[in-house]
Amino acid sequence: MPHNPFRDARYLISAHRLDQLPADTGAEIAFAGRSNAGKSSALNAICEQQGLARTSKTPGRTQQIVVFPLDDAHRLIDLPGYGYAKVPESLRAHWRSVIDTYLRTRASLRGIVLVMDARHPLKDFDRTMLDFTGATGRRCLCLLTKADKLSRGEGARVLEGVRRELAANWPGAEARLISALDGKGVDDARAVLAGWLFSEPA
Ligand code: GDP
């Protein structure tokens, strides 16, 4: 099996503001998702590291932009999770604007991974993210995770339905079914992301 470059990811910083991010050079991929969608578990599975992204349920901890460099020129970015009832509307509005600015202005951003629970895909937050990515011309890979909770037939139906909606509304986006639990689809997702990060010089 070829070397997995994401295994080299390590924790660097939790940023509260965009000016705390590393210099906007090289190449990075940002992960977004509703709280509890399975974003941390997907990141850990892709990086083959158990405790890299914290699968914490504490709202405060998730309201940060967490940076995981692979090397000097390549990074994964974990965007704040959404959907905690406890997060006040003012804070939500703040993060919406931070993420909007990030998506519009970050030159090194090669694409977005939108993690969704395969049992509840394309919620309002996901549609908003897809609108952002569409409007800013960003590539988007939708990872429908927790596939192990669905039968094969159900999984195939969900994937087909999501792909149909993407094609109709957000043609730049693609979708994959994965499971962080049994590893289904993870190699394939990793290959897509490695292509984004490493196919062009950083
Ligand atoms: P986050 O809030 O989006 O970072 O979500 P987490 O990664 O913390 O996952 C939320 C919950 O879903 C946790 O209880 C995980 O153990 C569970 N989970 C995440 N991914 C999977 C998966 O692929 N399969 C199953 N069965 N459970 C998962």
Image (cartoon, rainbow, N blue to C red):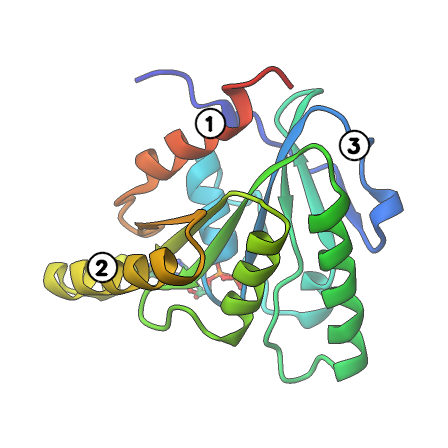
Quadrant of the rendered image holding ligand 1:
bottom left
Residue closer to the observer: 166 or 158: 166
Which element carries disc 2, helix, strand or loop?
helix
Kind of residue at disc 2: Glu
Which element carries disc 1, helix, strand or loop?
helix
Q: Quadrant of residue 131?
A: bottom right
The x and y percentages for residue 145 are: 35, 57
The x and y percentages for residue 17 are: 85, 53
The residue that disc 3 covers is 24
Of labels 1 and 3, earlier in sequence is 3
Kind of residue at disc 1: Ala
Residue closer to the observer: 60 or 140: 140
Q: Which label belongs to residue 7?
A: none
Circles 2 and 3 in contact, beta carbons < 8 Å: no
Q: Would residue 134 be seen by someone viewing this image from the given angle?
A: yes
Of labels 2 and 3, earlier in sequence is 3
Circles 1 and 3 in contact, beta carbons < 8 Å: no
The residue that disc 1 covers is 194
Of labels 1 and 2, earlier in sequence is 2
Residue at the right extreme, as displayed: 19
The residue that disc 2 covers is 160
Which element carries disc 3, helix, strand or loop?
loop
Q: Say if disc 1 is inside 8 Å of ligand 1.
A: no
The C terminus is located in which quarter? top right
Q: Are there few (<14), some (14-19), or many (20+) residues within 10 Å of tag 3?
A: some
The residue lying at 63 percent from left, 34 percent from top is 28
